[in-house]
Image (cartoon, helix red, strand yellow):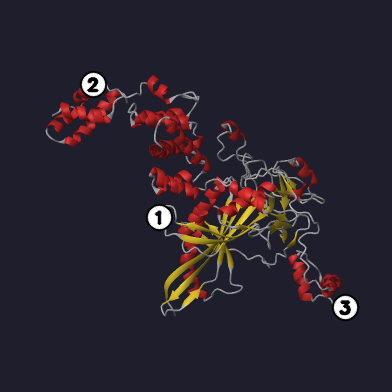
C-alpha cells in the first residue's frame, strides 16, 4: 500500500469539488501527492483507538462565547481599497456571474 | 395505463429563521436582522423620523451595502470567529418552545461552499451535533377549524447566513457579472427541520405562522417576511393510490427559498396538483437519486414551481469539525435558566383569551400574532381594570376597540406600504381604557368612541400625546346629551326636514324611521344617541 496514488477518477472529483481546473498532467501529478498524504494519515488506522473519545476540537476549552455587543466594522471605503484589481464596484464587489441558486441552505 | 384514484400529500419543512441578535454569529459586526439595526420593524420607542432616515437603499437592505462587515465576515487571513452567546440562548429558547431536547454538547462544522456570497469558501454550521433535537408541537389546538395534529421536530441547529448576490445593477440595469453585498453574511440562522408529518398546505402554513409567533414572543426574530427573516423549504411528495388499489410514492421535490406564507402554500398546492401527472408521464417513484430541487415563480396566475439545475455533487459538502471554534456545553443550570426566561407562549395566550374573555378563535389569533400588539392589548386590559372594570369585560371590550378602531387606523396609515401595528399608532393603552370607560358609562356613543380613538392616534397634530379622553370629549362637545328638550328639538327638526319619511312612519312603514334618525343625529352634531332618538321619534310619530 506504500504511497498508492489516488485513481484518476477520484482525483478528478476532488478537483471538481475544489473548483480547480487541472490539466491531465496536473491531475497525474496531484493523484500521487494526494496518495502520499492519504498514506501518511492512514498510519493512524494502525492504532488501537477503542475507548478513545473522538476529539471535537484541538483545544480543551468549551463555551468560548462573546457577549452580543456590536463592535467596530470596516468601512465600505476600506473594503473597496482591499478589493482585488477591477473588483471594486462601489458599494459592491464585482464577482463572476453566478448562475442558478447560490443561496446557502 | 393506471389511473390515480387518490392522492395523499406528504410534506416535511425546513425553516431558516434569522435571529435578531445585535451582532453577527461569529463576530461583532452589527446584524441586519437585529432589533434596532436598519429599519426597526415595530419599535414604538423609535421616533418616526429616524425610521425614515434609514429607509431602503437600492440593494433592498435597510443599511448601505457592504457596511456591516469586519475581518471575520470577509474571511480575511488571521480573523478568528467567536460565537455569540445570545444566538445560542435564543436558539435554546426556540428549541424548548418546540419541545426539543437541548444537546449537552454541540459543536461547529465547516460545510464547503463555493459561492462568493460567503467569502471564506465555507459555511459554519452544525452537522453532527445540533443544539436542539427531537421535539414536537401540536397544531389545530387553537380555533378548532383543524383537527389536532402532532408535528415532529427532527432538529434545530445554528448556522450562518450568506450575503446577497445581485444579478442586476442597482436600479435594474443589465450587467454581465454579479455583484455581492456581504451585510447579511454571518447573520445567525436557526434551521428548523420537521418530520414529514404534514398532510396538507393548511397545516404547513399554520405551523409556519405558529413558529413566527413563537420567535417573536421570545424576541428571537423580528419575523418580518418581506425582509427575509424567515425562509421556507418544503420537501413535498405524494402517495398515489391507483385504481387497482396499489400505492405509489412520487419522488421528493424540494422547493427552495419561499419567503411568504402565500408562496409556501402555493408551492405545496402546485406540487400536489402536478406530481400525479408527472408520475403518469415519467413513471419515476421515490428512491435514491430521484429528489429534485425546484424554485417558485409567483408571477404567473396562481404561481408555479420550476426545475432548478441541481448543483453538481450538491450533497458532497465535506463537513468537518471547525478547528477555530470551541464546542458548546450546556449544563443543567444554564438550560434551566433559559427555560425560566421563556414567557407565556402565543398558543397558550390565545387559549386564555378565548376562555377568559370569550373572544373568537380568529380574534384571539389576530391579537397574539404580534408580540407588541399582544402586550399592548394586555396593558389595555390592565388599564381598564384600574378604571374599575372586571377582567372579563375589559378583555372583551379592549379586543373590540383594538380590532376595530385600531385595525382601521393601522390600515389607513399603512396604505398598502409596510404594515403598521396598532401599538404604533400613538394612542396609549390608558387612553383606550379611558375611552372604554366613557362608553361603559354611557357618556359617549360608539361612534364617538371611534372618533376619540382616531383623535388620540395622532398626538401633537390633533391632541397632546397624554390627552385624557374624557377631557377631549368634553372640550369637543362629544359627550352624549341626555337633555330631553334637546333630543325633542333634534327630532322635530328631522321631521320638518323629512316630511315624507314622517308621513310614511305614521302610515305604518316603520323602516322609514332610519332616515329620520339619521337626520336627527346630524342635527345633534354627534351628541345624540341613536337609540334615544329612535325612541323619541316613535313616540312623536305614533
Residue B422 in sight:
no
Q: Which of label 1 and label 3 is nearer to you?
A: 1
Residue B336 in sight:
yes
Under circle 1, the secondary element is: loop
Q: Are the residues tagged 2 and 1 within 8 Å (C-beta)?
A: no
- B109 with respect to B482 (left or right): right
Under circle 2, the secondary element is: helix
Q: Quadrant of residue B36?
A: top right
Q: CA distance from mark 1 to mark 3?
A: 70 Å
Residue B352 image position (x, y, % from top left): 44, 46
Q: Nearer the viewer, residue B525 or B279?
A: B525
In the image, farthest residue toward the left: B507
| Residue at 42% across, 71% down | B6
Residue B527 image position (x, y, % from top left): 31, 24
In the rendered image, which quarter contains the N terminus of chain B?
bottom left
In the image, farthest residue toward the right: A2
Under circle 3, the secondary element is: loop
Question: Disc 2 marks which residue?
Answer: B484
Residue B285 image position (x, y, % from top left): 54, 75
- In primary-sequence order, the first of circles 2 and 1 is 1
Question: Disc 1 marks which residue?
Answer: B144
Tell which subunit mark 3 falls on. Answer: A
Q: Are the residues tagged 1 and 3 within 8 Å (C-beta)?
A: no
For residue A2, the mark is 3
Q: Residues within 10 Å of mark 3 (few under 14, many from 20)?
A: few
Amino acid at each position: 500500500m506504500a504511497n498508492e496514488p489516488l485513481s484518476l477518477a477520484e482525483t478528478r472529483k476532488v478537483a471538481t469539488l475544489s473548483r480547480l481546473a487541472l490539466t491531465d498532467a496536473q491531475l497525474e501529478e496531484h493523484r500521487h501527492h494526494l496518495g502520499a498524504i492519504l498514506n501518511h494519515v492512514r498510519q493512524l488506522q494502525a492504532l488501537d483507538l477503542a475507548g478513545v473519545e473522538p476529539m471535537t476540537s484541538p483545544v480543551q476549552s468549551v463555551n468560548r462565547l462573546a457577549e452580543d455587543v456590536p463592535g467596530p466594522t470596516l468601512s465600505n471605503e476600506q473594503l473597496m481599497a482591499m478589493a482585488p484589481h477591477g473588483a471594486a464596484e462601489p458599494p459592491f464587489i464585482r464577482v463572476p456571474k453566478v448562475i442558478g441558486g447560490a443561496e446557502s441552505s | 395505463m393506471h389511473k390515480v384514484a387518490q392522492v395523499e400529500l406528504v410534506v416535511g419543512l425546513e425553516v431558516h429563521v434569522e435571529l435578531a441578535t445585535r451582532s453577527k454569529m461569529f463576530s461583532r459586526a452589527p446584524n441586519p436582522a437585529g432589533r434596532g439595526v436598519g429599519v426597526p420593524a415595530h419599535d414604538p420607542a423609535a421616533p418616526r423620523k429616524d425610521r425614515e432616515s434609514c429607509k431602503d437603499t437600492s440593494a433592498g437592505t435597510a443599511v448601505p451595502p457592504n457596511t456591516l462587515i469586519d475581518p471575520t465576515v470577509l474571511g480575511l487571513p488571521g480573523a478568528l470567529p467567536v460565537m455569540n452567546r445570545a444566538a445560542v440562548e435564543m436558539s435554546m429558547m426556540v428549541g424548548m418552545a418546540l419541545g426539543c431536547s437541548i444537546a449537552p454538547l454541540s459543536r461547529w462544522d465547516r460545510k464547503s461552499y463555493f459561492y462568493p456570497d460567503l467569502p471564506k469558501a465555507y459555511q459554519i454550521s452544525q452537522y453532527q451535533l445540533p443544539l436542539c433535537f427531537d421535539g414536537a408541537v401540536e397544531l389545530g389546538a387553537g380555533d378548532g377549524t383543524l383537527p389536532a395534529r402532532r408535528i415532529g421536530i427532527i432538529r434545530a441547529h445554528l448556522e450562518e447566513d450568506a450575503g446577497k448576490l445581485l444579478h442586476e445593477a442597482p436600479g435594474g440595469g443589465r450587467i454581465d457579472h454579479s455583484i455581492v453585498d456581504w451585510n447579511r453574511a454571518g447573520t445567525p440562522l436557526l434551521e428548523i427541520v420537521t418530520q414529514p408529518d404534514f398532510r396538507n398546505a393548511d397545516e404547513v402554513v399554520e405551523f409556519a405562522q405558529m413558529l413566527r409567533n413563537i420567535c417573536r414572543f421570545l424576541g428571537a426574530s423580528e419575523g418580518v417576511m418581506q425582509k427575509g427573516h424567515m425562509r421556507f423549504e418544503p420537501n413535498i411528495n405524494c402517495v398515489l393510490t391507483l385504481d387497482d388499489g396499489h400505492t405509489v410514492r412520487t419522488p421528493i421535490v424540494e422547493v427552495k427559498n419561499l419567503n411568504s406564507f402565500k408562496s409556501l402554500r402555493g408551492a405545496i398546492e402546485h406540487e400536489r396538483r402536478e406530481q400525479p401527472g408527472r408520475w403518469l408521464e415519467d413513471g419515476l417513484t421515490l428512491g435514491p437519486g430521484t429528489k429534485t430541487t425546484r424554485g417558485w415563480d409567483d408571477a404567473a396566475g396562481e404561481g408555479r414551481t420550476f426545475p432548478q439545475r441541481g448543483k453538481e455533487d450538491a450533497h458532497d459538502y465535506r463537513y468537518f469539525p471547525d478547528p477555530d471554534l470551541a464546542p458548546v456545553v450546556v449544563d443543567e443550570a444554564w438550560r434551566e435558566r433559559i427555560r425560566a426566561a421563556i414567557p407565556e407562549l402565543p398558543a397558550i395566550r390565545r387559549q386564555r383569551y378565548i376562555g377568559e374573555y370569550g373572544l373568537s378563535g380568529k380574534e384571539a389569533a389576530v391579537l397574539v400574532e404580534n408580540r407588541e400588539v399582544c402586550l399592548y392589548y394586555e396593558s389595555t386590559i390592565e388599564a381598564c381594570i384600574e378604571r374599575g372594570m372586571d377582567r372579563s369585560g375589559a378583555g372583551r371590550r379592549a379586543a373590540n376597540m383594538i380590532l376595530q378602531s385600531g385595525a382601521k387606523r393601522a390600515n389607513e396609515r399603512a396604505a398598502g406600504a409596510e404594515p403598521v401595528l396598532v401599538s404604533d399608532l400613538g394612542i396609549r393603552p390608558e387612553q383606550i381604557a379611558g375611552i372604554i370607560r366613557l362608553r361603559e358609562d354611557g357618556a359617549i356613543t360608539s361612534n364617538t368612541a371611534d372618533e376619540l380613538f382616531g383623535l388620540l392616534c395622532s398626538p401633537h397634530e390633533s391632541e397632546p400625546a397624554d390627552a385624557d379622553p374624557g377631557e377631549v370629549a368634553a372640550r369637543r362637545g362629544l359627550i352624549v346629551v341626555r337633555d330631553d328638550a334637546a333630543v325633542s328639538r333634534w327630532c322635530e327638526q328631522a321631521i320638518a326636514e323629512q316630511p315624507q319619511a314622517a308621513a310614511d312612519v305614521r302610515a305604518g312603514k316603520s323602516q322609514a324611521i332610519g332616515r329620520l334618525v339619521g337626520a336627527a343625529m346630524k342635527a345633534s352634531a354627534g351628541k345624540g344617541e341613536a337609540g334615544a332618538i329612535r325612541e323619541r321619534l316613535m313616540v312623536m310619530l305614533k
